[in-house]
Amino acid sequence: MIIGILILAYLLFSILSFVAFSSGGKGLNLVSKIVGFLTLLVHGAWILVRGVQAGRWPFINTYETLILLGFFTMVIFFLIDWRRSIPLIGGFVGLIVSILLALTSFLPSEIEPLMPALKSNWLLFHVVSAFIGYSGLVLAAATAAVYLFLKFYLKIFSQKAGKWVERLKEVDWMTHRLIVFGFPFLTLGIVTGAIWANASWGRYWNWDPKETWAFITWTVYVIYLHLRRDEKNHGTRTAIMSLFGFATVMFTYFGVNFWLASIHAYQ
Amino acid sequence: MQEIRKFFQGFGPLNLVNAGLLVAALSAGIGTLTLPSKFLPLKLATVYSQPWFLGLFVVLGVASGLFALRKIFQLLRPSRAGAFEDIVSLPAPHEISIPGGSVAPLEDRASKILLKRGYRLKSEKRANGSSLLAEKNLWGRWASFLIHLGFAAVLLGGFLTFLFAETHHIVLPEGETVPLPTTSAQIRLEKFSIVFHPDQLEVDEYVSRLLVQNGKRTFRDDLKVNRPLQIGQSLLFQKSYQVVVQGLELFVYRHGEMLERIRLKPEELKPLTQAPFVIQVDTVVPDFVRDKKGNVASRTPYFKNPAALISLYDARDEANAKVKVWAFEDLMFHTGHENEEWAFAIQKIRKRYFSGVQVSRDPGVLPAYFGFVLLTFGVFVFSFVSLRQFFFRFTEDKTKHRIRVEIYYKNGKDRFSFEREIVKLKAELMSETPEATA
């Protein structure tokens, strides 16, 4: 029920952000931010209540981590929006978070106790750092989508390009900063996961599908960072690379849980 | 000719590294695919132990290590007198022109602005002006060294693990003492327990209570999931368990009256002492449940609701069971069944647990962990500590009674925020002189 309300509220936030972007209305932009922020507060409260009810950290299965991913994505969005507001990004982020939350309807929502394999202090560090990383990378994909959308838009209406050229550079830079923000947390998530695996399974790296795809995701972003050193790769190329990275993040998160046999599949 | 040169330029060191990383990622991804064997009779998961795959990681590790080595030489090299000139050679400068006859007051103002923003300054006098080097977050320069050294160390650890790590799986039967592989120690599984969450069917913990004799030292400790036990250089991990039903004690009822108590092993045929019948336990189900179709299954592998399928044969006809019935622990079951001739209740189930323990010795852990620390620290420094180096060149133009200020910056990673910083610095520098021009 509450998740349904959150989905609708984030969709409303998304629509308001898109309208605020297209109309350029500052009042509407403020209203969208208030809707988004209030929804985020309810979202955070839901996670807190779930944790209290379960008597454990509320992120041990795909259902709970989807909700956590949506929460972190919105938190990071508001942190960057506080510094530099681009309503179009809010529109994309609201849409992505709504979809993430909607995916929970395919999953069992019952509160399950902690299984022995997850009884570890590493759970907090591993999951939280990995999902902060994922959130940063999800947002980077949103800004990359905004970049490509604007680029396409400017190509069609080139006479309006003038004022947007600087904005385009800023969106490209924002994508980069978000990847640079998400990447260390992704690294920390992988590293804490490896240390935990050593304590739990007796080997810090098992080439389990989850680990392997986490490595692939990490490698994709390493290649992105290497490419970014050359200025001629800035813009469209790195935006596409960011979307490709996002696809690997999503496969690491969902694909492995549902399509590959992994010891990490806790759905 | 130019095309050929362009082609080979594409194989610069960084592009080669990217290509190597891409191949490593693709190969690793292929290993996770589970294709039906009839379409592709290849064991893709074996890719991780193929020599070419390992070779690729060795090359990446060596490349990363060499880069770290080159970087440390650069970092430790004492700064040369002409270091300012290195910066001057970087992208075209921002320029402003401020009215004034002397550089000193303007340099002072620039210094104050930069000091307020946390920059460290170095000044150098020149023939017709001066130069100012402003730097902050200098330790951000260490990021790529730390990352590449860390990555190399992790791969070294992985390589040592691949070559020298030992893993043994041992099965400890309850009550037995077994030698611990690769050590002189002996361990005895005193008890294996499955602890459940209060009021729930889910398991909270698997615990092997071990008695360890290592040389002259004897101690008792619990081995749990996520809580390995160190004995000498080896680590013990709780990996699995197995339970074997060794026997049952049954109450046999006839017409609601207890006839006798009998001990049986699974599948053992045993005659009753009080009647000319033979009894057998066909199977034992730990957590009995019947589905909608009436099929019997075990809800969990734990002995929450054990049941035994009992067959009773006439002593003269052991081929055909006279009675086939499920027996449970619940004695109340029988109170309403006095009309049935035969009924059974489980009094006791004798089980024996076997604990599956992994014994590992891995010399790769230490370098890998060292690498993890460096790598993690390095990526955080890379992301959140942005090295900033600005170079201000003040030049007097006595004929026009103006001072020309050129601002250069050094760092290609985050040009956009550098440009923003320069715009702010320029604005502050020009704020007190309305006649200034950019």
Image: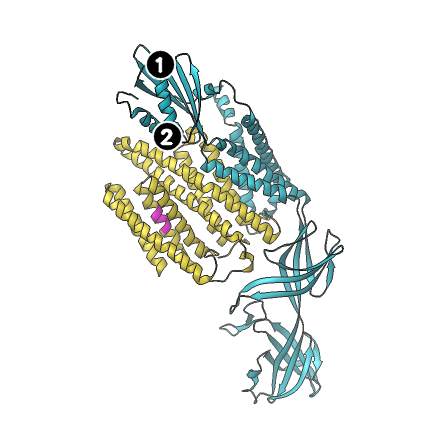
Chain colours: A yellow, B cyan
Residue at screen point 49% across, 73% down: B292
Residues A234 and B291: in front is: A234
Q: Whole-percent x and y of residue B224? A: 61, 59
Q: Which mark is residue B88?
A: none
Instruction: Determine the image quadrant of residue B222.
Output: bottom right
The mark total stands at 2
Type of residue at label 1?
A: Glu
Q: Main secondary structure of the magenta part?
A: helix
B178 relative to A190 in the view: left or right: right
For mark 1, give the secondary structure: strand
Per the image, the residue denoted by label 1 is B396
Placement of the N terminus of chain A among the 4 image quadrants: bottom left
Identified by mark 2, the residue type is: Glu
Q: Which residues are magenta?
A: A93-97
Q: Chain of mark 2?
A: B
> Residue B421 — which label?
2
A140 magenta-colored: no
Residue A90 is situated, as x and y percent measured from the top left of the image, at: 33, 45
Corner quadrant of residue B411: top left
> What residue is shown at x 36% (from left), y 58% (from top)?
A3
